Image: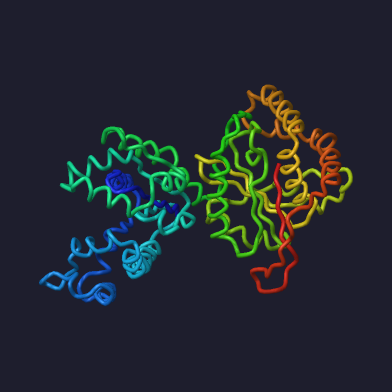
Amino acid sequence: MLKIGLTGGIASGKSLVATRLQELGATLIDADLLARQVVEPGTPGLAGVVAAFGAGILDPEGRLDRPALGAIVFQDPAKREVLNSIVHPLVRESAAAILATAGPGDVVVQDIPLLVETGQGSSFHLVIVVDAPDEVRVQRMVEQRGMTNQDARSRMAAQATRTERLAAADIVLDNSGSREDLLAAVDSLWADRLQPFADNLKLKQRAPRGTGPVLEASRAEWLQEAGRLIARIRAAAPDGLSLEHVGSTSIAGLAAKDVIDLQLGVPDLGIADEIAPLLSSAGFPLVPGITTDTPKPTQPEPSGWQKRFHANADPGRPVNLHVRVSGSPGWKYALMFRDWLRADAEAREIYESLKRGLAVRFADDQDTAGYADAKEPWFTDVAWPRMEAWAARTGWQPPSAVPLEDPTGSPSAEVPNSGQ
């Protein structure tokens, strides 16, 4: 299934987005609703809240007096943390029970107001943030909810900042305009990205890429996106595997195709095959038929350049996930290539010039295979000797391989990384 985390600050319009996604076919798990249910009379949740804050937070009928409790916790971060420590685990348990009923191909949206604050982003295939400027949200709370300006700002201060939410977002839905604008954006998102993503997950296939090479100017956002993707893969894969951002989008200032290359290091390719279903469920299905990189002259043995190749099922974010053996020549090449280009401005300039020329040459292709093949002689004949000379001159070494226990429990070798 496709798991979506939906969040946004108070009065951002998140509930409207949640309702629309449910109308379009998503299964909705509403954390606010669950938070109310887990503190109904007679529940362990309500008993825990009373034990922490006293019977004064109950109304005459023995139900939770939310305004009374809110007056306590929204003014005191420490007390808010106590409340969250009681309620959040119960909400997650209830959400997991609903999630367990979803099937392949389903889109499950979890509406979580404090998704960013509780660090749950890596649990989802995508995080959607509904966004509006702070002043717009204050105005909505004052005009639509009858709050004072001070109360509205106090509620906002109890949540993550707008900057923190945007940094966690894979998708931002702007709700500074009209209701109709927001609903139209949700409809487009569903048709163009969410439904195709869910279909690809069900079929265990990568998202199609039907164009030739298009280079874009270097973007700082690539590093942020890679960080979120790495966190997601780490959450799905066994502990201890190395994982790094490699390839052109990892090099500041270098024009690149809008494709994030990541490298996952494994003790051996047997482990790579064992964890393939985990990577697929996380959104990165195996791409059959791509099992090796091109050997380089001083390390010609083909076995050192074998790998497994996964790619993102998300049509909105192309990702290549190279799975290689730690310490192998292919793993080492990708890391050295990245670090060499980061350190050598002249090399970056030469490589970018090559890429731009080839992008023009293969612009009318339906894929990037010809573009990639045309770069191989440069990697072998030009980059490789210069990289080796640079590594010898600077004393460069790849990251230390980490001893691992493999998922079967038997001792393993080490961990790797790579991508160009």
Residue 266 falls left or right of residue 45: right
74 over 18 or under it: above or below = below
Residue that appears at 77% across and 56% down: 327
The location of residue 316, given as percent across then percent down, is 50, 39
Q: Where on the picture, by quarter, is residue 180? A: top left
Q: Residue furthest left?
A: 60
Total number of numbered discs in the rendering = 0
The quadrant of the picture occupied by the N terminus is bottom left
Depth check: give the residue in front, 314 or 366: 314
Depth check: give the residue in front, 20 or 233: 233
Residue 93 falls left or right of residue 212: left
Query: In this figure, which colouring scheme has been used for the structure?
Result: rainbow
Residue that appears at 45% across and 41% down: 193
The location of residue 294, given as percent across then percent down, is 79, 43
Residue that appears at 70% across and 22% down: 361
The location of residue 330, given as percent across then percent down, is 77, 49
Residue that appears at 81% across and 34% down: 377
The quadrant of the picture occupied by the C terminus is top right
400 over 130 or under it: above or below = below
The location of residue 232, given as percent across then percent down, is 53, 54
